[in-house]
Image (cartoon, helix red, strand yellow):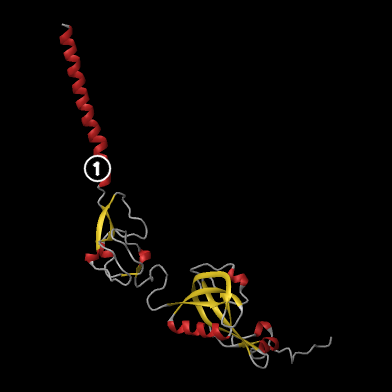
């Protein structure tokens, strides 16, 4: 009698163990398998990629990615990468990231779109503005020239330029002065203007509102014109407005 009861208990225990194992497998192992097979993929190099390689389908492959989202700067499908050029060498099996590719929008993470140039200039008399400057802000470039007759002229040569980077540490310019450096994004012709100004004159920067893209007439303004003209009536070309008295012609009226 006792043996029969023992056998019954052992049978019940075995059934409970089998059921528990099935429940565990269904609830936990099934979920683990589904999380590993989320369906997302990550693009990696099929073989070592050298600088200058224009990526083809055969240069790339995908590997499973367990997360539901691919990290920023990475790629999930091969067609997102095909046609780009390698900017920085990529080893076999390494993820292909935006910072290592030169696309039409950005030169390998350097922020230089196609058709544009990055140009560095030495900035003078702009320490207050430099303290406010950050990459992505907009500035105007002013050129200050001292003439042989000891006169001074200032002109805003370019407007609405984007700042790529700011180097507060000073370095020696071509004029022998120790000045901080700012790198700007410019069109090729604008880059030539900035390089010429940097080599033969003093360059100042003025900070713009990021939403302000207005431009104006950029005529030279001399110190002599500033001193002769009345402040409120001074026009963009440095001359006095019609009818505005200058410092030389204005007289005091007797009471």
Which residue corresponds to the image point at 23% horizontal and 27% vertical from the top-left? 20
Residue 81, image x, y percentages:
29, 65
Report the number of discs: 1
**Left or right of 164, for residue 180:** right
Q: Which residue is mark 1?
A: 33
At 24% across and 68% down in the image, what residue appears?
56
Q: Is residue 26 above or below residue 148?
A: above
- Occupied quadrant, residue 206: bottom right
In the displayed structure image, the side of residue 239 where residue 36 appears, left or right? left
Where is residue 60? Give x, y as percent.
25, 63
Which of the 4 image quadrants contains residue 88? bottom left
Determine whether the residue tagged by mark 1 lies in a helix, strand or loop: helix
Q: How far across and how far down the image is residue 160, in percent?
A: 50, 76
Decide if residue 215 is in sight here: no
Q: Is residue 97 placed above or below 178 in the rendered structure?
A: above
Quarter where residue 125 is shown = bottom right
Is the C terminus in the top left, top right, bottom left or bottom right quadrant? bottom right
The quadrant in which the N terminus is found is top left
User: In the rendered image of this protein, does residue 229 appear above or below residue 87?
Assistant: below
Q: Position of residue 161 (x, y in %)?
A: 49, 76
Q: Residue furthest right?
A: 255
Which of 142 and 183 lies nearest the eye of the viewer?
183
Query: Callout 1: 10 Å neighbours few (<14), some, many (20+)?
Result: few
**Residue lying furthest top in this view?**
1
Residue lying at 43% horizontally and 82% vertically, measured from the top left: 188
**Is any atom of residue 115 visible in this view?**
yes
133 in relation to 232, above or below: above
């Amino acid at each position: 009698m006792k043996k029969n009861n023992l056998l019954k208990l052992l049978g019940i225990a075995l059934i409970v163990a089998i059921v528990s194992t099935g429940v565990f497998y269904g609830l936990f192992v099934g979920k683990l398998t589904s999380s590993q097979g989320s369906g997302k993929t990550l693009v990696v190099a099929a073989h070592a990629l050298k600088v200058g390689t224009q990526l083809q389908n055969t240069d790339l492959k995908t590997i499973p990615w367990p997360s539901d989202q691919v990290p920023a700067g990475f790629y999930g499908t091969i067609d997102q990468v095909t046609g780009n050029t390698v900017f920085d060498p990529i080893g076999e099996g390494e993820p292909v990231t935006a910072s290592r590719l030169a696309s039409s929008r950005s030169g390998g993470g350097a922020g230089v779109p196609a058709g544009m140039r990055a140009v560095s200039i030495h900035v003078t008399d702009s320490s207050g503005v430099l303290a406010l400057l950050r990459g992505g802000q907009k500035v105007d470039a002013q050129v200050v020239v001292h003439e042989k007759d000891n006169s001074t002229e200032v002109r805003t040569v370019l407007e609405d330029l984007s700042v790529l980077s700011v180097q507060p540490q000073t370095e020696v310019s071509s004029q022998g002065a120790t000045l901080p450096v700012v790198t700007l994004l410019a069109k090729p012709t604008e880059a030539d203007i900035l390089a010429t100004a940097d080599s033969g004159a003093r360059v100042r920067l003025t900070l713009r509102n990021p939403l302000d893209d207005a431009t104006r007439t950029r005529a030279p303004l001399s110190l002599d014109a500033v001193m002769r003209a009345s402040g409120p009536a001074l026009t963009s070309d440095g001359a006095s407005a019609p009818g505005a008295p200058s410092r030389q012609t204005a007289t005091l009226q007797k009471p």
